[in-house]
Amino acid sequence: MNILILDDNPCVCMMIEKALKELAVDGEIHIANSFEAAQTILNQKTIDAAFLDIELDDENPDHNGLLLARELVKKHTSAKIIFVSSYPNYALTAYDVHPFDFVVKPVNIERLKGSANRVFEAIEREKQVFVEQREAVKSERLFIRTNKEMFFLPYNEIFFIEKVSKEVLIHTERGEHIVRWTLAELETMLPKSFVRVHKSFLVNADKICRISEFGDRTYEIFFGAVNKTAILSRYKVNDLFEVMNIPYKE
């Protein structure tokens, strides 16, 4: 596991590093005191978890923790991000990178440790998911574990996957299945025909029969065999059409 700490205050970096070491984290900790140093680390390592300050002492005001977070999730979509900032007003702005947590300075060490523990547990769960999926991938089936049973669901029976409140639902022609995984975890496990089209939807492009304009450059996806629809964000149209091998230009 590779962990990145970014803060222009070396004392804060040391404090976070000490807290993580007290948790006996099995991983390598990389420390950066500037945006450029953090970028260098991103180019050299696959970062699994990042603890990022937002406002940095940099000549370029755009070189901040938010920009670095965006670069990180482009390289490694399952990376877990915790912002550690003195400015809680950034919490809404930071939403687009789906941070795991937002810790406000001055840092409460126990609060930070609790958040870090949850991050590392999530990363370990994802590793276990890949182990469980190894055989399922070979047979083109998704391994599903519920409270009462375990079974394999063929990929071609899945129409779309939806996050509803705290639950993740897999929609098939024969009904719905509630699973324990997150959309981000499923996105890394499923074949390329499954596309993240919205923060709450992951769709099987092979099952789409119609797309209709739904609002201001937002669309509704229809699947024919299921009487439910998914939402397509305007920011994800190109991603979807690329997978479907359809030329698209706004």
Image (spheres, grey):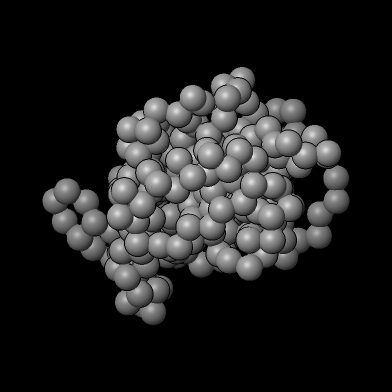
Residue drawn at point x = 61 percent, y = 38 percent: 9
Asked if residue 75 lies left or right of residue 5, the reply is right
Can the viewer see residue 245 in this picture?
A: yes
Question: Please, is residue 60 above or below residue 215 in the view?
Answer: below
Residue drawn at point x = 77 percent, y = 39 percent: 58
Question: Please, is residue 172 above or below residue 190 in the view?
Answer: above
Residue 213 or residue 164, whichever sits in front: 164
Q: Residue lying furthest top in this view?
A: 89
Q: Position of residue 175 (x, y in %)?
A: 33, 47
Residue 230 or residue 12, whichever sits in front: 12
Q: Quadrant of residue 97?
A: top right
Residue drawn at point x = 35 percent, y = 39 percent: 113
Residue drawn at point x = 44 percent, y = 56 percent: 186
Q: Position of residue 67 (x, y in %)?
A: 70, 43
| Quadrant placement of the C terminus | top right
Q: Position of residue 19 (x, y in %)?
A: 38, 44
Q: Residue lying furthest front in this view?
A: 11
Residue 239 or residue 26, whichever sits in front: 26
